[in-house]
Image (spheres, coloured by chain):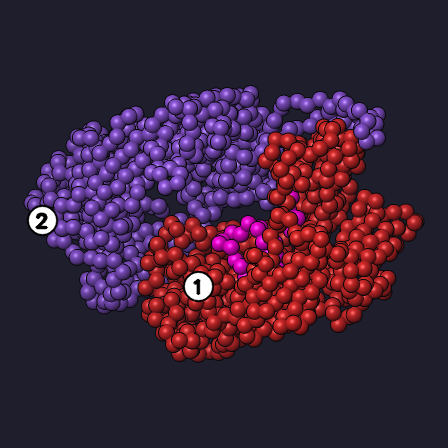
Amino acid sequence: MSLPGRPHRLAPLVFVLALTIQLAASPPQIGIQGAPPGPRTGLIVGQVVEAATGAPVPEAIVSLTLPKYLQDLPTTPKGRVMADSEGRYFFSDLPAGDYYLRASKKGYAGGIYGQRRASGETQLFTLGEAERRTDARLMLWKYAAIGGTVVDEVGEPVVDVAVYALSRDFIAGRPRFGKMITQPWAAPTTTTDDRGMFRISQLPPGSYVIVVPSTQTTVPVTVLGTYAGNSSLLNEVVSATMPNGGYWRAEMEETPLGRSRTQQVGDFAMLTMNRVLIPPPATPSGRMAVYKTTYYPAATTARAAAVITVKSGEERADVNVSLRPVPAVRVSGRLVTPSGTPPAPTSIRLVGESATDVADAGFETVTGISDPSGRFTLLGVPAGEYVLKHANTRLAIAARQGLPALWLNQRVTVGSRDIDDLSVELRPVLRVEGRVEFRGQSPPGRASAPRGISFEPPFGDQSSPAAEYIDGSFATVATPGQYIARPWELSGWSVQSVTLDGKNITDSVIDLQGDATSFVVVYTDRRAILSGTVNDARGELSTDAVALAFPADRERWAGYGTNPRTFKSKSVSRAGVYAFENLPAGEYFLVAIDGADADGWTDPETLALLAAWATRVTVAAEESKTLDLTLKAIR
Amino acid sequence: MIVRPHVAIVVAIACGAAAAAQQPVRDNAPVPNGTATIAGNILVSGETKQPARRVRVTLNDVTGAIPGRTTTTDDAGAFAFRGLPAGRYQLKAIKKAYLTASFGAPRPERPGTPIVVKDGEQITDVAMAIARGGVISGSVRDERGRPVPGVTVRVLRFAYNATTGERTLVAPSSGSTNTTDDRGDYRAYGLPPGGYVVLANPLPTSGRSDTPDIRPLTPAEVQQALQAARTGSSVPGAPATVAVPTTNVRVNYAPVFHPGVTDISAATPIALGLSEERAGVDLTIQYVATATVSGTIGVPDGILPQIVRLTLVPAGGQTELLAGAGLRGATAQAGSDGSYMFSGVAPGLYTLKAITTGGGRGGAPTPPALWADADVTVSGQNVTAPLTLQPGVNITGHAVFEGSQPAPAELKTLSFAIVQPGSGGLRKTSTAVDPEGRFTITGVTPDTYQFEAAWTSPVASARWLVKSSTANGRDAFDVPLRVNPGEPLDWTITFTDKPTGVGGVLQDRAGRAATDYFILVFSTDRRYWTPGSRRIRMMRPATDGAFSAKGLPAGDYFLAALTDLEPGEWNDPTLLERIAGSAIKVTLRDGEMTTQDLRIGG
């Protein structure tokens, strides 16, 4: 989640995975005091329709807010009405302003004004003083549904196991599954019933892979039941067991962990939390077998899975998954810190192929926790190539609290034999620090949104360290690797440059292998705007278009991080006008297409297609330009 | 469905008293290893004799001193626990969509009998069967018959509350709460036989009072708005009066019970048999006219120094059933001016309660809590309900130990609470117990409460038994206690590790261990035949016929054996009255374990 301040399910994770598209599910929460000026004589009348057919949606709930003003004030207009049997609604006695309008109905996605796709860009509805508008059309997309059955190797239904639908999208030029998620609980999900049947019925139209995740968790017996009151140990236990199901919290608080174990080898017990596949019992000699994470129809990686594309309202009921156990071994070892002492009990995870192109937390193969002497055992590891990682993502918080912030990232090859004495070295994190300058007429006023900077992996496949600006500087920690420094966008300002040790690294990939403490971020209030109108084939202003801008240089169509400044999409206004703010200097392709066709436009193959229709434009630093476009039909 | 238990005639075969030997036990003991084995097979109930695969089998020592173990059955339904120390073990078989079975239980969901194993003993023929749970399925539709997706449906079973002994509604399995799919369908599985109601709740389950209500628009209103838009001026600044009527009607969905009623007493109960599948249990959800309940909170001196939290709970005698169904009412917080508001309140009878928390700004001590309550009737019209706060009651407590003293770490696992009968087990807990055993419960709203002590450590819980519990000289042990306005309570709880109790062996007519019985010990004094009484105890004999109950207050008791009992049914005075006649009388002396062997006679 790239948007700081969004509610997190857990304690705030400072290492975050950024998104390319902001989720526009709720209106901005911050507003100004005071009452909107002007007479309250405006009127908005509109209709809620189904996007695919244009048919009215009866009795949808429509809500209206004026996000510029504090919502709680009685003087701020707001309302919640039920549309009539023809989907028609109105709000009266309104002052002029930019309104947030949203229709909602169970079983439908979208509904926010301005959306031309179910998860597309939204707009505010501008109402002039005493204006009476009758064109506030809100579109809903009926959810699609994907269903099937999960059975095991003898055809017995697998009951109460989690099934996820991961949307396929393109991040930084590569396919990625479940882009909106850092943890699988945020993806559309359901559980199988007593017949092994599932039906994921809240899918916005799009392309999906279906997956039955399987993670084995091993905890030392000495840790079971002892965590009450020990918050740091509880954190580690939570980190290790969290991927195992949405109900970890209830499970942790209400029953001692020990009750949910399935197998025990020596001083280590394998847990069976909610919604987890129960493996076959170990043989008397201790040989184990486990179920691997399985993608429909029988793939072990998301990329090898069958992609299911569903349209609004479509249903697929034949997505059957058959699970087979594979032999597994035990991986044991010891964690050591740079000083040679064992770390406090630490959560660890083995991330294998099942997590490739997917969130690695939640799709790892095995998780566990070390004991006070640093020893760990992971039960139920199938053969394969893995990376052993620290499961606790709160490195930055630890560093800020002065605690030793250590990381690990070690390749492990597992074959058909137990691994008994893996030595794993934890390393200190890198310090990432710098300062920020605002060059403008006056410094930015009181913050209306958080200000800070993220460090994005070029392909968005790792978590992003992030920090807020405090008194003109920022500090966070990172593990070694490649990053793009990405200052957060700030209304009224644009990023002029980012330098490290005096070298300009704006929008470029840097390879961090040591502490980097001399970043300088410069914002300027001189804004560059590239704008124009979009006309359709008949020469009339288009109101359904989306304008797209992307680099003309094909070399830059991949590896640009998760929130690139050089890839922009913008819905045209009611007047058929688009505007891009703060495109960095360079050569771009500009093209306008129907908003409904814009899903997945950053796929490099689609970009090649769009380039053929696009207009090439050169943008100089801090230059404003006008360029009118003609709508292209790409279907 | 209640199966009437058969009372077995028992005869006393020996009489005597012996002080029980105390077994020293401690927490976090290393996993003890032994030489005994308990192994066997699990089948699926029914005629097919099909093996039950992937069943989680749990093994727990009845004293809690030996850490539990778990294994899973193989494809032949076989399981084995090896290397066990001698002991008495409870065995359970757990599988999703099936009913949990305990070894020796006459039917699913009943307590089992412990397996007694000696050092080196190899028990390899344990046979158990698990039955498929029942299924209730159906769909949720709106008033026009259209499916409604995304509605939470809870299938709830009538059962006895384990704590309070009251009849309430419980969620019977993890598969019993569902969200309807795009077809409006739900399916609850893994259900034990019994009486059920089905609840559909289209509202967010958070129970917050800020769920905004909705103003429904009529086609006529929309027509007028359109008319106004077309005829009115669109020139900015021009005078414009839009003649659009605004009604005060507000609606929202209300939780409904099958087949489509908001009142639980009008719900159609479903009697589900063992492994029965019941389809077509449909619900129609409906909008109801909602109202606000608002008012101002007054205090004697006119100052509102603290945070005031309010709850609006459905009343009318069904409170505990609704609480069991998760309908605990709405909560709100009063503003700094003492005003409060609940919006979107459905028609019905409610109890409005206010209680203060916090305060004591700038390091000042927390002022005593204040409370107020009122009954409110809502029927679509907005209601104003002013409240005046009164001081709450503080309870100061002291835990006293007889015999040895608990270790400080052990004492930390002790807590106290008061539970309101009829609240579905909602409790108000004490502050942490200090090293001297002292604690407080502040700001108690005057009412009747059951007083409780609990240890989180199972070992401490098994060792320390409550001997007596009094508050201001009144008994707070066996009967709920009235907390009166303006009367602070001094609560003393005495624990002992010298238990008073009864134990023995149950034999059949041939003198063999009899295991297929439920043994009930209960006071001869009918005043103690109340839900949650400490003087009523159910026991199951182990495989060697041995049974015991510790922690009973000294006095005269009846001892009886029955063929079957529903959990909690032993609190039912009519049942106790029925079996008292054929029971054996025993006298329990303070600090002694009385031995009373029984033989099935008659």
Q: Amino acid at mark 1?
A: Gly
Mark 2 packing: few (<14 Cα in 10 Å), some, or many (20+)?
A: some
**How far across and how far down the image is residue A324, in percent?**
52, 66
**How far across and how far down the image is residue B306, in percent?**
41, 33
Residue drawn where x is 50% and y is 62% of the image:
A396
Mark 2 element type: loop
Q: Is residue B280 above or below residue A442?
A: above
Query: For the C terminus of chain B, which image quadrant?
Result: top left
Q: Amino acid at mark 2?
A: Ala
Marker disc for residue B19: 2
Mainly helix, strand or loop, the magenta region?
loop
Q: Colour of chain B?
A: purple
Residue B574 or B167: which is nearer the viewer?
A: B167
Q: CA distance from mark 2 to mark 1?
A: 57 Å
**How far across and how far down the image is residue B214, in percent?**
62, 31
Chain drawn red, letter?
A
Residue drawn where x is 23% and y is 42% of the image:
B438
Looking at the image, is mark 2 or mark 1 nearer the viewer? 1
In the rendered image, which residue does mark 1 sit on? Answer: A402
